[in-house]
Image: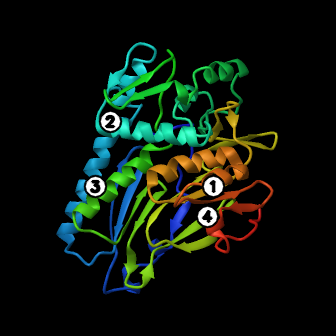
Amino acid sequence: MKPLCLCLGLYLALLSAAFADEPKVNPEIPLVRHAREAMGTVFTLTVADPLPAELVERAALAAFDEIDRLEALLSEWRETSEISAVNRAAGLAPVVVSAETFDCVSRAIEVSRLTDGAFDLTWAAFRGLWKFSDETPPRLPDPDRIKAALSNVGFRKVKADKKARTLFLEQRGMTLGLGGIGQGFAVDRAVIILRAHGLSRFIVDGGGDLYVAGEKAEGRPWVIGVQHPRDRGRLVAELPLPEGAVVTSGDYERFFEIEGRRYHHIIDLRTGYPATGSVSTTVFSADATLADALATGLFVMGPKGLSKLEAMPGVEAAVFSPDGQIDFTSGLKGRFPARWKP
């Protein structure tokens, strides 16, 4: 998928500490890396399995092919994609889609519901309103255009018929965008492919959406670092992660400032303006699809949203607030400092 001006939180804010270790640190099991551009970012596979290079390469190619296949289905930037077909049929008729597209959209609807619309897959109605290009002078969108876009936002107007496997946007002018969940979905599919090829120790990194499998070496878990929101060279925390997904959303990738106020790409779709309660959020979960979408939803909700995630089995999260405070779910107690220095 093409990078979006409103790409709702797809940014590499997690740096694997394992990536800093060159093979010489652990020469008996060197890390093998494969990378490919897809979905408007770079997907990187880092493998620690002591397997033949040819086997690892076949597994990586199969995973990348699956990611490319998903992009062809899910990208609203491709006229031939199933999502584009659904968007063209908004207000007209349901569209039959593949199992993969239906699954991804269904997961997006689920997270939209869980976050009360803080994450909303109909965000694409705002595409082009907020511009964060260096080539474009910073300026605020016309309020009337924001109001018009808000009228085309609403996940409850997305109808998914499981039996018929159709998707339907009830209102003409509505547009689906999977930028806040599609990369996580692709990461999870890549994990399935790699495991089917016999791999068990690896990291899949889809533009900052990470899935960690197994250990880096016997008794040595992979370690991820959570980036400081205002200092790209600093880490706020380093955490061992034996298995699972972790995703960060931050206000520091695409933004502009007017009169000292920062306007960034993570839009609160309840107001049409950038969310103000967070500068960064990090979510841990069993799969990258959920972590990807929740990282955006939590960013919009701010610290108050942690109570929702606390009730979700297997989910942990941290919120960095503008005043320097760090709030987190109970499972992260003692693993994050209480504050970060703005």
Report if the CB atoms under discs 4 and 3 are less than 8 Å apart. no
**Spot occupied by residue 306 in the image (x, y as percentages of width and height):** 67, 54
Residue in the picture at 48% in, 26% down: 158
**What label does residue 227 carry, if any?**
4
* Location of mark 2 (residue): 73
Label 1, label 3: how far apart the Cα atoms are:
28 Å
Q: Nearer the viewer, residue 96 or 181?
A: 96
**Spot occupied by residue 327 in the image (x, y as percentages of width and height):** 72, 61
Asked whether residue 235 appears in the rendered view, the answer is: no
Q: Residues within 10 Å of mark 1 (few under 14, many from 20)?
A: many
Q: Earlier in the sequence, mark 2 or mark 4?
A: 2
Q: Earlier in the sequence, mark 1 or mark 4?
A: 4
Instruction: Report the amino acid beneath label 3.
Output: Ala
**What label does residue 63 carry, if any?**
3
**What label does residue 213 carry, if any?**
none
Disc 2, SS: helix
**Tag nearer the camera, 1 or 4:** 1
Left or right, residue 263 beside residue 136? right
Instruction: Report the amino acid beneath label 1.
Output: Thr
Quarter placement of the N terminus = top left
Q: Earlier in the sequence, mark 4 or mark 3?
A: 3
Disc 1, SS: strand
Report if the CB atoms under discs 1 and 3 are less than 8 Å apart. no
Label 2, label 1: how far apart the Cα atoms are:
29 Å
Quadrant of res 243: bottom left
Instruction: Report the amino acid beneath label 2.
Output: Leu
Label 4, label 3: how far apart the Cα atoms are:
27 Å
**Tag nearer the camera, 4 or 3:** 3
* Location of mark 1 (residue): 281
Disc 3, SS: helix
